[in-house]
Amino acid sequence: MTIKLLKNKMIIPILIIIGIVVTTSCEDMIRENMEKKTVSIISPPNNYQSDELSITFYWNEVDGADYYNIRVWDDKNVLKLDENVDTTIYDYSFPYFGTYTWQVKAVNSATESPFTTYTIFIDSTSDLSQTTLNLSSPDDNYYYNDMDVVFEWDALYSADDYRFEITDLNGNLIDNTVITTYDSISYTFAEEGDYIWMVRGQNVTSNTAYSYRYITIDTTIPNTPTLIYPFNTDSISTYPFTMSWNRWGETGSPIADSLHLASDSLFTSITTVLKTISSDSTYSVSDTLTSGNYFWFITSFDAAGNISSNSDTIKFYVK
């Protein structure tokens, strides 16, 4: 009799658990399938333009939804908002003026609907005269070792197009003015030199001031440096001593030197690699080197990335 009672007591909890599992599974099976449903947006309409940073989003209720996921992306595809809400209204303040994408989907415990996606333009004014156009690439005072350059800037919502110009340092126009509706342009320089590139945004009633930057086009490889001291068979016994070399015919962008100093001619055990952009072409060795033979050479490179050939490799002796 005792055994039967124990069995009955064990059966009851098991039946309860089974009932819970079955009930939960049935609930999931009978939940509304959201995959073929669509969130219908009430306001603001698609491609809406506002001069206010604060906006209220409205959409219709979707039967069977537990909550809604609302997202906002800026024009750089950066996610600015990702929020779950149980209402069909949401107040949002945009961080800055610009073009945004906002989207909503309905979700329950079993499925979710596709996103409904709209675009919204937040712009305080169509008057560009008080707006600054931001240049993005290349950086100001940039040295470039290619004749082909891509210039880029941030798009302005109220601009119909952009006026692009390149001048020399005296302000003389190098080429014809280019009008483009894009926020970038590829340009091929005819020759090396120092230039100013500038862009302004414009529409039928106004334009921004020009935003400008400097760029140097330098495709010339620096001349191969010549070593002066120490030279072949020189013997050094006092510290500090100064290593020196010569750069000749320097033109274009600032030049740097890379000094390689090693105790073997294959430079597998390099003691010193020095890189410095400087008008000086000397290096003071203050640390005491162990006695023996040493080898060194110099390579020059400039700020644009052009690299010279290696100088001759010179052997000297430290006592």
Image (spheres, rainbow, N blue to C red):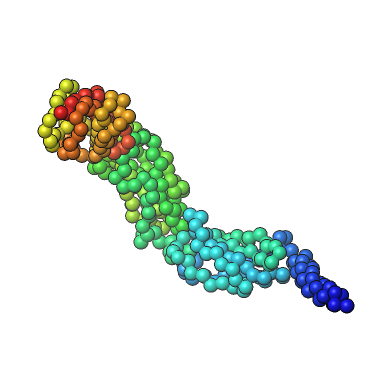
**Above-or-below relation of 285 to 311:** below
- Identify the residue shown where x is 50% and y is 62%: 80
* Residue positioned most to the left: 238
Q: Nearer the viewer, residue 286 or 161?
A: 286
Image quadrant assignment for residue 144: top left
**Above-or-below relation of 171 to 31:** above
Q: Quadrant of the N terminus?
A: bottom right
- Identify the residue shown where x is 60% and y is 66%: 69
Asked if residue 48 can be seen in this view, the reply is no
- Identify the residue shown where x is 72% and y is 60%: 36
Residue 207 location (% of width, % of height): 38, 55
As drawn, is 219 to the left or to the right of 186? left
**Above-or-below relation of 279 to 127:** above
* Residue positioned most to the right: 1
Residue 104 location (% of width, % of height): 61, 64
Q: Nearer the viewer, residue 312 or 3?
A: 3
Give the number of marks. Answer: 0
Residue 129 location (% of width, % of height): 36, 59
Q: Nearer the viewer, residue 261 or 253?
A: 261
As drawn, is 91 to the left or to the right of 137? right
Residue 88 location (% of width, % of height): 62, 72
* Residue positioned most to the top: 233
Q: Quadrant of the C terminus?
A: top left
Asked if residue 287 can be seen in this view, the reply is yes
